[in-house]
Image (cartoon, rainbow, N blue to C red):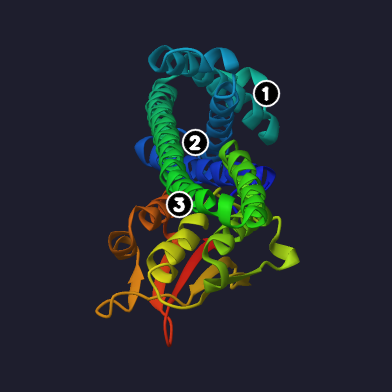
């Protein structure tokens, strides 16, 4: 599904990773400092001091990173101010905690001598490295958000373009059919107008949302297929199968419409005689799979199976839009595949993560 409320586990997982990474970094720093100044402390005692200083310092950075006032500042002054606060807080606060753990006089929080200067200089270098890494990570996160926003806007633009492509094609043909029915069969024309109103209402409702449900999507498909079955008469029959447990599954709006329209436009309308469409949703191996099966003309003989770019190139812009939206929203976790059915028709499958 598109949205899953997993913010609390993700927050705790992120905190656990930050703690584990900080602990490991401080342990390495303690070993390097012991190697640089072996006369400073014993390794276990030095380990306690470095861990306390490092954890307080990194915790201070994490807390300051949530400050709304700091977040409104430019990057350079924000990280300069963060360092000006976090470095002395980490150094003296960490020493204080270490002395309390070791049950030593707090007056020793400030040391003297060359070795302590080595430790202080080493701490400054380590702090500068951590601040640089945090700033780089922050910049990468902002760039990722910017790319995500740009991708979302592009996807929304593609969806608006898709609606602009689908609705006129369907409306023009339906209105042309209505014009002939008004005199020949007024009651049939009335039923077609009623179904067209239902379809347009559902399409308008979907246009206002970035996410819809399979239930709403299937309702829209039913309205569309009702109109098409009135237009095509006995040449078109259809079946929709949506299990109750999948009705609330979230999907992008109008994801399935191009598949159904493509089946009618390229498969059933050009074919002589009757045809059928089946749309079936299933939960398979941690994914939601929706299949659109038709008994139309089928795929080109030289391409019995299509996926990815090939599906869009052979079957038009509608399926290319479906493929692009799936890639933008789900990446490699989603797919669109078309296969030739026996004895005729196409088996189109959209798979999205559940």
- Which residue bears the numbered disc 1? 105
| Residue 117 appears left or right of 252 | left
Q: Determine if residue 181 is in view.
A: yes
90 or 85: nearer the viewer? 85
| Mark 1 and mark 2: Cα distance apart in space | 16 Å
Work out which residue is located at the far bottom of the displayed protein and give it: 343
- Which residue bears the numbered disc 3? 173
Tell me which label, 3 or 1, sits earlier in the chain.
1
Q: Determine if residue 333 is in view.
A: no
x, y percent for residue 38: 40, 38
Residue 136 sits in quarter: top left
Which mark lies nearer to you, 3 or 2?
3
CB-based contact (under 8 Å), mark 3 and mark 2: no
CB-based contact (under 8 Å), mark 3 and mark 1: no
x, y percent for residue 349: 48, 69
Work out which residue is located at the far left of the displayed protein and give it: 302
232 or 110: nearer the viewer? 232
Residue 335 sits in quarter: bottom left
Mark 3 lies on a secondary structure that is helix
- Which residue bears the numbered disc 2? 41
| Residue 193 appears left or right of 57 | right
Mark 2 lies on a secondary structure that is loop
| Residue 292 appears left or right of 296 | right
Residue located 34% across and 64% down the image: 311
Work out which residue is located at the far right of the displayed protein and give it: 244
């Amino acid at each position: 599904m598109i949205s899953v409320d997993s913010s609390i586990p993700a927050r705790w997982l992120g905190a656990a990773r930050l703690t584990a990474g900080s602990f490991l970094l401080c342990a390495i720093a303690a070993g390097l400092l012991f190697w640089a100044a072996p006369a400073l402390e014993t390794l276990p005692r030095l380990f306690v001091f470095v861990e306390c200083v490092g954890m307080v310092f990194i915790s201070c950075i994490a807390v300051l990173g949530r400050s709304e006032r700091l977040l409104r500042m430019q990057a350079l002054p924000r990280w300069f101010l963060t360092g000006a606060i976090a470095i002395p807080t980490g150094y003296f606060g960490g020493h204080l905690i270490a002395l309390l753990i070791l049950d030593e006089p707090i007056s020793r929080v400030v040391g003297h001598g060359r070795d302590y200067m080595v430790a202080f200089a080493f701490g400054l270098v380590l702090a500068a490295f951590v601040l640089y890494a945090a700033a780089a990570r922050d910049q990468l996160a902002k760039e990722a958000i910017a790319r995500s926003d740009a991708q979302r806007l592009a996807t929304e633009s593609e969806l608006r373009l898709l609606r602009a492509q689908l609705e006129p094609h369907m409306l023009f043909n339906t209105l042309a059919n209505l014009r002939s029915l008004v005199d020949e069969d007024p009651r049939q024309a009335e039923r077609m107008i009623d179904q067209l109103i239902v379809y347009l209402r559902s399409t308008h409702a979907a246009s206002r949302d970035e996410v819809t449900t399979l239930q709403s999507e299937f309702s829209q498909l039913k309205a569309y297929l009702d109109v098409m079955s009135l237009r095509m008469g006995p040449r078109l029959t259809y079946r929709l199968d949506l299990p109750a447990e999948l009705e609330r599954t979230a999907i992008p709006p109008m994801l399935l419409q191009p598949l159904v329209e493509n089946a009618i436009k390229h498969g059933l309308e050009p074919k002589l005689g009757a045809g059928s469409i089946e749309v079936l949703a299933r939960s398979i191996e941690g994914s939601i799979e929706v299949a659109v099966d038709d008994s139309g003309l089928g795929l080109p003989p030289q391409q019995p199976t299509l996926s990815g770019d090939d599906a869009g190139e052979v079957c038009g812009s509608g399926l290319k839009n479906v493929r692009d939206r799936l890639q933008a929203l789900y990446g490699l976790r989603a797919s669109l595949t078309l296969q030739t059915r026996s004895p005729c028709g196409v088996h189109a499958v959209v798979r999205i993560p559940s």
